[in-house]
Image (cartoon, rainbow, N blue to C red):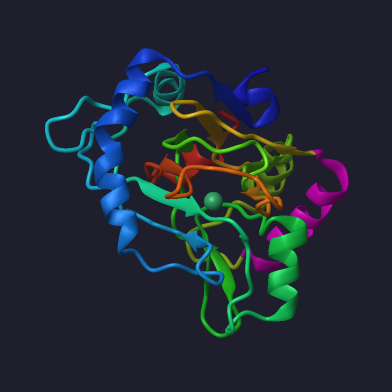
Amino acid sequence: MTLAARGWQVFAPEPATLAWVASVLPEARARLACAPRRHGGTWVPGVDLLPNDATGAVSCGPPLDGAALTTAQALFGPLPLHPAQLSATHPGYPRRDPSETEAAHRFRRLRHATHLDGLIPEGPDRRRHLREPHAWILGVALTEAEPDAAPLTVLDGSHRLIGQAFRAARPTPDTDLTDLYATIRRRAFDSCPRRALPLPPGGAVLLHRMTLHGVAPWAEGARADPDGRIIAYVRPLLPDLDRWLSAA
Ligand SMILES: [Fe+2]
C-alpha cells in the first residue's frame, strides 16, 4: 500500500539506511544523554537535536539515503533536510508530569497524544495555526526496540479527512484552525483504524504531511536499547501553503 492511499508507508532496512544509522548513532546517543526529558523522564522530544547537514550527513558520514527518502523527495522535488528530531522513549512512557492535566495525560495514554505536526498550539488558550507546514515526515529507527516499546501509531487514512476539510477552509498561516482540527480529529478517531508501526533499526516510515499520528504507551516488560527507543525524524518545510493543501 502506498503513501497516497493510506497516509503512511513503511520501508524495510537497507544497506544505505543502515550505514546512515551507524554513522549518526554515536552523536545521537551523546546528544540525547544530556537533553531534557518530559513525562516523568520517559520521553525526550529532541526537536532539531541531530547536528546533520542538508543531506542528513553528520560530520563526514554518509547522507541519508534509501527508498523512503527517494519516495519522499519525489513528492515535491528535493528539499534540504533540517536537523533531525530525535524522539527517544523509555520504559514507563508516558508518566504524568506535575504540570500536566489529568485530561492531557489520559489523552496521551489512551489516544497516544495523536496530533498533526505543524499545528502549533499558542497562547493560554492553545489556539492552533498552521505555522510549520511540513512537506512530509520521515522517521528512521536508530535502536532496537520490541514492537510494543512505545511504537509510532497512525490513524490510517486520516490524511484524507484532514485534506478535505483544510482544502475547503483554505487557511492562511493566520487562520485559527483549532475548532476545525478538533472536529476532524474526533471524526478520525471514530472512522480511521489505529495502527502501530514498530520499526527495526534502519527501518523507515514515511508519513503524509496530513496524517494524524502519535506514540503508544510503553507496554509493561517491553525491552529496548538501554538508551531507549530512538527514532530520527526529518520534516522539511513546504512554506507554499497552496502546495501543502494540494491533493499530492
Ligand atoms: Fe508528530
Question: Which stretch appears magenta?
Answer: 177-193
> In the rendered image, which quarter contains the C terminus?
top right
Query: Splitting the image into 4 quarters, where does residue 61 fall?
Result: top left
Q: Position of residue 63 (x, y in %)?
A: 24, 26
As drawn, which residue projects farthest toward the right?
190
Does 64 sit left or right of 46 as displayed? left
- 167 over 48 or under it: above or below: above
- 202 over 81 or under it: above or below: above
Q: Is residue 63 magenta?
A: no
Q: For this rendering, which residue is in front, 246 or 20?
A: 20
Q: Position of residue 170 (x, y in %)?
A: 60, 51
Marker count (numbered):
0
Q: Is residue 184 magenta?
A: yes
Q: Position of residue 118 (x, y in %)?
A: 50, 55
Q: For this rendering, which residue is in front, 184 or 139?
A: 139
- 238 over 140 or under it: above or below: below
Q: Is residue 79 something one can see in this rendering? A: yes
> In the rendered image, which quarter contains the N terminus?
top right
Q: Residue at x 69, y 59 (%)?
A: 181
Secondary structure of the magenta portion, mostly?
helix
Does 59 sit left or right of 130 as displayed? left
Q: Residue at x 51, y 81 (%)?
A: 123
Does 235 sit left or right of 119 as displayed? left
Q: Is residue 56 something one can see in this rendering? A: no
